[in-house]
Image (spheres, rainbow, N blue to C red):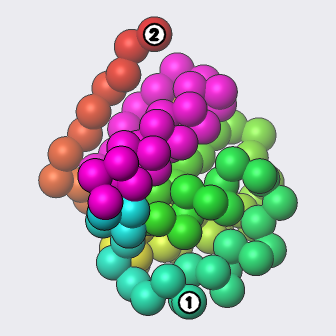
């Protein structure tokens, strides 16, 4: 699933909300399609304090101005179907070339 949001702050908030929702349903790893150890290795190099925890549960986000290495990690994981939710800002919609079964556009 790809979710489009208005800005970086909303991308982070939506990712954290989805992480909390999954945890409250007693299925915190429901969006993760690989072993947790594989994701933890990649997320150790992530400097964004919001991105690392959500990646560990199968959610990633992208925004303009994001660190290139972190963006590459998120894109690679989504393309490999390791994470199943990608949250992106509207401004990046023309740069994304991924296939998805569902696209959601969130409004403010």
Residue occupying the point 55% across, 48% down: 61
Residue occupying the point 48% across, 72% down: 77
| Residue 58 counted in the magenta span | no
The reply to whether residue 97 is in sight is: no
Residue 100 in the figure: left or right of residue 21? left
Q: Viewer-nearest of labels 1 and 2?
A: 1
The residue at which mark 2 appears reads as: 108
Residue 34 in the figure: left or right of residue 13? left
Q: Which SS class for mark 2? A: loop
Q: Which SS class for mark 1? A: helix
| Residue 2 counted in the magenta span | yes
Q: Tell me where residue 100 appears, x and y as whole percent.
A: 24, 55
Q: Nearer the viewer, residue 95 or 25?
A: 25
Above/below status of 105 relative to 86: above
Residue 79 in the figure: left or right of residue 15? left
Whole-angstrom CA distance, mark 1 to mark 2, is 35 Å
Residues at badges 1 and 2 in contact (C-beta under 8 Å)?
no
Category of crowding for the residue at label 1, using alpha-carbon neighbours closer than 10 angstroms: few (below 14), some (14–19), many (at least 20): few
Residue occupying the point 36% across, 22% down: 106
Above/below status of 16 relative to 7: below
Q: Which residues are magenta?
A: 1-26
Q: Tell me the number on the disc at residue 67.
A: none
The residue at which mark 1 appears reads as: 37
Category of crowding for the residue at label 2, using alpha-carbon neighbours closer than 10 angstroms: few (below 14), some (14–19), many (at least 20): few
Q: Tell me where residue 46 appears, x and y as whole percent.
A: 76, 66
Q: Tell me where residue 98 appears, x and y as whole percent.
A: 35, 58
């Amino acid at each position: 699933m790809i979710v489009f949001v208005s800005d970086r702050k909303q991308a982070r908030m939506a990712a954290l909300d989805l992480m909390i929702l999954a945890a409250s349903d007693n299925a915190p790893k429901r969006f993760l399609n690989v072993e947790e150890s594989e994701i933890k290795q990649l997320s150790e190099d992530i400097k964004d304090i919001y991105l690392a925890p959500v990646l560990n549960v199968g959610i990633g986000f992208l925004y303009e101005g994001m660190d290139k290495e972190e963006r590459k990690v998120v894109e690679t994981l989504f393309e490999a179907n390791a994470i199943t939710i990608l949250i992106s800002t509207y401004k990046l919609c023309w740069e994304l070339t991924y296939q998805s079964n569902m696209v959601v556009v969130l409004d403010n």
